[in-house]
C-alpha cells in the first residue's frame, strides 16, 4: 500500500470502488447545490420560505442568502467535518477497515441535505410538494441505507451506535451494530410505509419509531456489555 493510500485510509478516505463512488457522489451533490445557488441567485426572491411547522405550513421566511446558500454551506461544512474527524479520533486506525462505508455515510448525509435543498427551492418557486409525506419517506430511505452499513462500522468515537457500553466492549459494539443494521433496515421500510399511508401523522410517527429503536439498541448494548468477560473500564483503567 502506498503512503498516500495509507494516509487516506487512516483519515477515513476512499477505499475501493464503493468508497470512490461514495466520495464522487458527495462532491457531485455539493457542486450541484452551489451551482444552482449561483445560477438561480438573480431570479430568487428576496423573501424565501426557510422553515415549516408540523402541519407543512411556512412559519418563517428569510432573505436570499439564507434561502439559497445556508443549506449548501451546511452540507459543505458537514462533509468537511466528516473528513476531518478521523484525524482526531483515538480509534483512527479502525477507519482503514471501514473506509468504504464511511465514504458512503458522508455521501448519504450530503445527499439527504441536497434532497432537502431541492424541496426548499421547489417550494420557494411556487412548486407543489407534499412535504409531510416526502420528509418521512426520505428519512426512511436514509435509515435503510444506514442500516446496510451498520455491520461494516468498526469501533470509533464519532460514527455508529456509540454508548458507554459499545465503547467499552468490542463484543457489545459488534453485536449491537449487527442488530442495529437489521433494526434500521426494518425501521426504514416501516417509515417509508408510514409516509405513504399516515398523512400528517407520518413525521411524528417516524420520529417516535426512531426514538424507540434508539432506546432499545442502547439497552441491548448494555445487556451484551454486562455479559462480556473482556469488557474494559473507560480508557482501559481500573478505578483510582
Image (cartoon, rainbow, N blue to C red):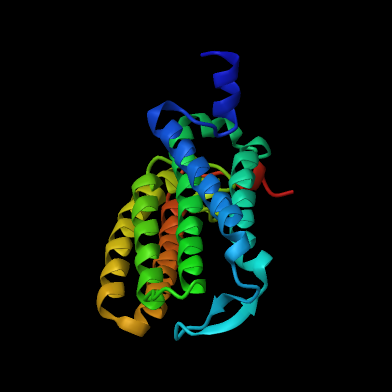
Expressed as whole percent of the image width and height from the top left, the position of residue 185 reads: 31, 56
The residue furthest top is: 2
Expressed as whole percent of the image width and height from the top left, the position of residue 153 reads: 45, 41
The residue furthest front is: 43
Toward which corner of the image does residue 174 lie, by quadrant?
A: top left
Is residue 230 visible in the rendered structure shown here? Answer: no
Expressed as whole percent of the image width and height from the top left, the position of residue 171 reads: 43, 43
- Name the residue rendered at 61%, 49% in the picture: 76
Toward which corner of the image does residue 19 lie, by quadrant?
A: top left
- Name the residue rendered at 47%, 45% in the picture: 107
- Name the residue rendered at 54%, 27% in the picture: 9
Q: Is residue 37 above or below residue 155?
A: below
Q: Is residue 118 above or below residue 10?
A: below
In the image shown, does 61 or 131 lie closer to the viewer? 61
Expressed as whole percent of the image width and height from the top left, the position of residue 212 reads: 40, 71
Q: Is residue 132 above or below residue 187?
A: below
In the image shown, does 122 or 17 lie closer to the viewer? 122
Is residue 186 visible in the rendered structure shown here? Answer: yes
In the image shown, does 233 or 140 lie closer to the viewer? 140
Q: Is residue 49 above or below residue 154?
A: below
Q: Report the side of 21 relative to 88 (left or right).
A: left
- Name the residue rendered at 39%, 28% in the picture: 17
In the image shown, does 171 or 27 lie closer to the viewer? 27
Amino acid at each position: 500500500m502506498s503512503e498516500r493510500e495509507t494516509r487516506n485510509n487512516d483519515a477515513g478516505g476512499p477505499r475501493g470502488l464503493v468508497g470512490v463512488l461514495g466520495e464522487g457522489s458527495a462532491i457531485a451533490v455539493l457542486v450541484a447545490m452551489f451551482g444552482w445557488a449561483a445560477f438561480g441567485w438573480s431570479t430568487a426572491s428576496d423573501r424565501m420560505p426557510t422553515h415549516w411547522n408540523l402541519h407543512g405550513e411556512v412559519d418563517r421566511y428569510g432573505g436570499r442568502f439564507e434561502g439559497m446558500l445556508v443549506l449548501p454551506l451546511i452540507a459543505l461544512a458537514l462533509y468537511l467535518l466528516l473528513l476531518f474527524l478521523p484525524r482526531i479520533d483515538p480509534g483512527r486506525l479502525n477507519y482503514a477497515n471501514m473506509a468504504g462505508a464511511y465514504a458512503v455515510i458522508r455521501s448519504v448525509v450530503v445527499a439527504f441535505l441536497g434532497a432537502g435543498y431541492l424541496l426548499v427551492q421547489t417550494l420557494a418557486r411556487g412548486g407543489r410538494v407534499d412535504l409531510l409525506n416526502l420528509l418521512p419517506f426520505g428519512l426512511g430511505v436514509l435509515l435503510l441505507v444506514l442500516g446496510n452499513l451498520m455491520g461494516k462500522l468498526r469501533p470509533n468515537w464519532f460514527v455508529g451506535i456509540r454508548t458507554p457500553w459499545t465503547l467499552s466492549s468490542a463484543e457489545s459494539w459488534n453485536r449491537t451494530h449487527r442488530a442495529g443494521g437489521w433494526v434500521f433496515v426494518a425501521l426504514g421500510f416501516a417509515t417509508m410505509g408510514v409516509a405513504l399511508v399516515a398523512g400528517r401523522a407520518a413525521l411524528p410517527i417516524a420520529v417516535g419509531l426512531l426514538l424507540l429503536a434508539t432506546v432499545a439498541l442502547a439497552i441491548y448494548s448494555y445487556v451484551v456489555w454486562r455479559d462480556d468477560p473482556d469488557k474494559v473500564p473507560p480508557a482501559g483503567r481500573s478505578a483510582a
